[in-house]
Amino acid sequence: MRVFNFAAGPSTLPLPVLEQAQKELLDYQGTGMSITEMSHRGKPFMAVNQEANALLRELMNIPDNYSVLFVQGGASQQFAAVPLNLLQKGKADYVLTGNFASKAYEEGLKYGDMAVAASSKEDNYTFIPDMKDVKFRDGIDYVHTTYNNTIFGTRYTELPKTDATLVTDMSSCILSEEVDVSKFGLIYAGAKKNIAPAGLTIVIVRKDLLGKALPICPTMLNYAVQDKNDSLYNTPPCFPIYVSLLVFRYLKSLGGVKAMQKINEEKAKMLYDFIDNSSFYTNKVRAKDRSIMNVPFVSPSAELDAKFVAEASKNGLVSLKGHRITGGMRASIYNAMPIEGVVALIDFMKKFELENK
Ligand SMILES: *Cc1c(COP(=O)(O)O)cnc(C)c1O
């Protein structure tokens, strides 16, 4: 039996996508083999690669002067790839809004003069610093932000004020809401949260930023090399790209990102409203900065948190344990989490509260 899976990543996929992948697993469109068993340079896979790229462009309304790259290494690899490709003057500023933002900053320190422009660490990353108040240094190559903070459940609703190239990590929110790509020089996202199985990383980069990588940049991390080779410089993660294509088609059939955003906002609102109206559960994030993808919350005690997670799991609501850094619970309600899953979670929360108050 399928459960409602609230895992932060790898995470739940749409059932119709899994069913199609299952149907095609032994014989991909009459080839007599699966998509993972054939050459990545053969016609069937090349068509998958090309359509996935084109559909992502369509779904995110990506302007023509941007390249879309399918690479490997996860978002964590991009923490190094970004400075290796973008540092010209050798300086960049980072906004620290959580664990992954800090990891990106620490990796960046290996390659240049990096500074923390703002941080919400003092308050356990429960908010996004007000962008209108943040000053960046002169002469920087880029400002790095983390658009949605998966562990702490925050998200940007306002962008930094800067003329420098804006870089953002959208690993846990890509395709969850409409974004104006043209505001960014570079967007990257590990696919394993809101799109596909782990193994694929998406890089959306403005073309004028290509071809300026540092001499020490590994060939595999060089965006210009990946761009020139249509992301087929070496063997790509074929299966995750194929599943991404199925997810993109599915998203399009539902009405695209605009329709998805509406559903996501509705799901998040239901859950936050319930938590805010309860005296038993708490979410500590400043209201305007709340993520619509990851909703952390706690009950009155760590013991009850543990009991909640265990009992929820027995009721088919799994992976609700919060990150080890934060404790408590976290419901990741990505695109593929149906509204019924959130309704079932809220029903369980009500019942648990009555039994444990
Ligand atoms: C999960 C996550 C990462 C790390 O992703 P990997 O693909 O495991 O490297 C980085 N940034 C954010 C915002 C994430 O949610």
Image (tube, rainbow, N blue to C red):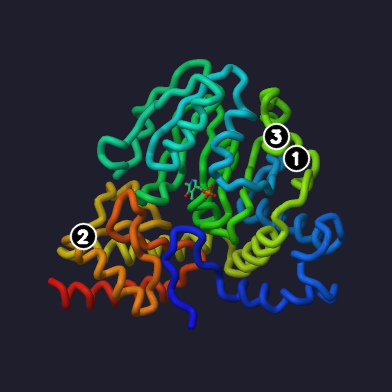
Is residue 189 shown left or right of residue 101?
A: right
Query: Of the residues shown, which amino acid type is indicated by label 1?
Result: Asp
Which badge, 1 or 3, is on the more N-terminal residue?
Answer: 3
Q: Is mark 2 within 8 Å of ligand 1?
A: no
Q: Which residue is identified by label 3?
A: 222
Q: Specify the farthest residue to the bottom.
A: 1
Q: Nearer the viewer, mark 2 or mark 3?
A: 2
Task: In this rendered view, identify the residue nearer to me: 289 or 357.
Answer: 357
Query: Of the residues shown, which amino acid type is indicated by label 3?
Result: Asn
**Tag shown at residue 302:** 2
Figure check: 302 above or below 356: above
Q: Which residue is identified by label 1?
A: 227
> Mark 1, residues whose alpha carbon is within 10 Å: few (<14), some, or many (≥20)?
some
Q: Position of residue 259 (x, y in %)?
A: 52, 63
Is residue 49 shown left or right of residue 179?
A: right
Q: Residue at coordinates 45% horizontally, 30% vertically from top-left?
A: 94
Q: Residue at coordinates 34% horizontally, 79% vertically from top-left?
A: 315
Q: Which of marks 1 and 3 is in front?
A: 3
Q: Residue at coordinates 29% horizontally, 44% vertically from top-left?
A: 126
Marks 2 and 1, how far apart at CA? 48 Å
Task: In this rendered view, identify the residue nearer to me: 201 or 183.
Answer: 201
Marks 2 and 3, how far apart at CA? 45 Å
Determine the secondary structure under disc 2.
helix
Report if residue 134 is visible in the image.
yes
Q: Where is residue 19 in the image (x, y as percent from the top left)?
A: 63, 77
Determine the secondary structure under disc 3.
loop
